Image (cartoon, rainbow, N blue to C red):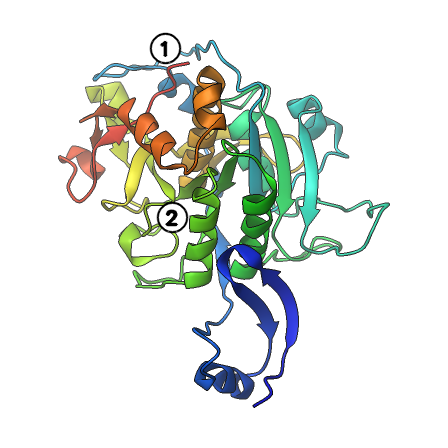
């Protein structure tokens, strides 16, 4: 039987293809003995909202069991020599305030909206909604970032932005395409920031083998894949890719209990679960919008950005180790081991249950 469909992409690392077809044709594929599995592409969600106030950098340099806020961010390393891929809504380096935040360290490397050659159009990689700029600024911005010397490769995975009022949908296939390329073309020790994920309006389960396998393929080539837990209070075990150990999953905290009790507190919106590697500041984070103006933003997207920055500092400090990874698992384990156990509580200050009370500070 001849199978029909338009091949949109070939994912070599996971032995899969992305094909456009109708439901009737999909059923034919599903029944064909040559096809192992068929699953529908999905829309996924960018995981941050813009809101108020700024304290994250102040918090992450405190390595004690009873952290305080002292209005300073102390660091010895900048992440220089490390590369971070940001798979998000883009970054508009035509805007002087945005370009200045990265000092030539940021580069647009892919835009899902453009498949042509060079020269690229003026809107190449532009950020419509601000999510990508906010995340990238927290990872490695000069004034807002953790790793102020890291190199940034921006892959715009949201559809649209060539005209006003676009909603910027992002499909799982966009993420898989980017991860497939990264797994084949980047060296061990590269860091990938995935501040987006499946957030369907319920607690699942929702699994997608294509996304899981793409994360696994990158991880198994020594690529560090840092993933947002997401913002609906559910369990990370019920979603792709946060249910697999090849994703380094980050939940989000707020500052409320730091001031009163010297504790970090998981925000009620942050997902929890044994799959969460660590918690990090994620709500009320000082960053920039798509125009380069200061804002405050919320979500585990920001927590993930902080850990991507911390990975860059750690790998700068231990470059031979990171550069010789055969899988990312040893890097995950070593960074977890630098964490402080017991400082993160559940909402309201209750003892954490269902997840490890771990906070990984910036020790470099």
Find numbered disc 1 in the image and state the secondary structure of the residue it sits on.
Answer: loop
Pointer 1: what residue? 70
Q: CA distance from mark 2 to mark 1?
A: 29 Å
Q: Is residue 86 above or below residue 160?
A: above
Pointer 2: what residue? Answer: 230
Percent from the top left, x then y, of residue 135?
Answer: 53, 36
- Which is more foreground, mark 2 or mark 1? 2
The answer to which image quadrant residue 344 occupies is top left
- Going by the image, does 353 lie left or right of 14? left
Give how far across and how far down residue 360 sits, in percent: 32, 25
Mark 2 Cα-neighbour bin, 10 Å: few <14, some 14–19, many ≥20: many
Location of residue 329 in the rendering, given as x and y in whole percent from the top left corner: 35, 37
Give the quadrant of the C terminus.
top left
> Could you tell me which residue is drawn at 64 percent across and 57 percent down?
159
Q: Is residue 312 above or below residue 178?
A: above
Viewer-side residue, 34 vs 332: 34
Q: Is residue 113 above or below residue 95?
A: below
In the image, 135 versus 213, the foreground residue is: 213
- Between residue 206 and residue 322, name the one nearer to us: 322
- Is residue 88 visible in the rendered structure shown here? no
- Cβ atoms at labels 2 and 1 below 8 Å apart: no
- Horizontal side of 316 relative to 359 (left or right) equals right
Query: How many numbered marks, from 0 up?
Result: 2
Can you say which quadrant of the picture contains the N terminus?
bottom right
Kind of element beneath mark 2: loop
For residue 185, side relative to residue 257 (left or right): right
Mark nearer the N terminus (2 vs 1): 1
Residue found at x 60% / y 49%: 181
Could you classify mark 1 by the number of other residues whose Cα lies within 10 Å: few (under 14), some (14-19), or many (20 or more)?
A: few
**Residue 204 occupies which quadrant of the picture?**
bottom left
Q: Which mark is residue 49?
A: none
Residue drawn at point x = 46 percent, y = 49 percent = 217
């Amino acid at each position: 039987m001849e199978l029909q469909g338009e091949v949109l992409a070939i994912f070599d690392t996971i032995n899969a293809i992305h094909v456009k077809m109708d439901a009737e044709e999909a059923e034919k594929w599903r029944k064909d003995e040559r096809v192992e599995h068929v699953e529908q592409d999905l829309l996924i969600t960018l995981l941050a909202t813009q809101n108020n106030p700024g304290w994250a950098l102040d918090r992450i340099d405190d390595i004690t069991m009873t952290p305080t806020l002292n209005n300073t961010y102390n660091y010895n390393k900048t992440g220089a020599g490390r590369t971070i891929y940001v798979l998000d809504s883009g970054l508009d380096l035509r805007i002087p305030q945005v370009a200045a935040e990265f000092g030539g360290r940021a580069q647009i490397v892919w835009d899902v909206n453009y498949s042509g050659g060079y020269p690229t159009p003026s809107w190449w990689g532009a950020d419509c909604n601000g999510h990508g700029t906010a995340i990238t600024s927290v990872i490695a911005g000069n004034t807002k970032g953790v790793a102020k010397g890291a190199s940034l490769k921006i892959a715009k995975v949201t559809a649209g932005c060539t005209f006003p009022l676009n909603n910027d949908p992002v499909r799982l296939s966009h993420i898989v395409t980017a991860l497939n390329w990264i797994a084949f073309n980047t060296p061990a020790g590269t860091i990938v920031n995935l501040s987006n994920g499946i957030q369907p309006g319920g607690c699942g389960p929702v699994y997608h083998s294509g996304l899981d396998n793409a994360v696994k393929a990158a991880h198994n080539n020594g690529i560090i894949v840092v993933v947002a837990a997401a913002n609906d209070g559910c369990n990370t075990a019920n979603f792709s890719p946060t249910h697999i150990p090849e994703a380094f999953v980050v939940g989000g905290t707020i500052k409320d209990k730091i001031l009163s009790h010297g504790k970090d507190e998981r925000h009620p919106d942050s997902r929890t679960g044994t799959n969460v590697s660590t918690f990090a500041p994620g709500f009320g984070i000082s960053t920039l919008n798509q125009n380069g103006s200061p804002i405050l933003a919320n979500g585990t997207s920001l927590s993930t950005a902080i850990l991507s920055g911390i990975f860059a500092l750690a790998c700068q400090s231990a470059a031979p180790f990171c550069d010789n990874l055969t899988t990312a698992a040893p890097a995950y384990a070593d960074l977890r081991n630098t964490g402080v156990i017991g400082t993160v509580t559940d909402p309201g200050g209750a003892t954490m249950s269902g997840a490890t009370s771990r906070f990984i500070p910036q020790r470099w």
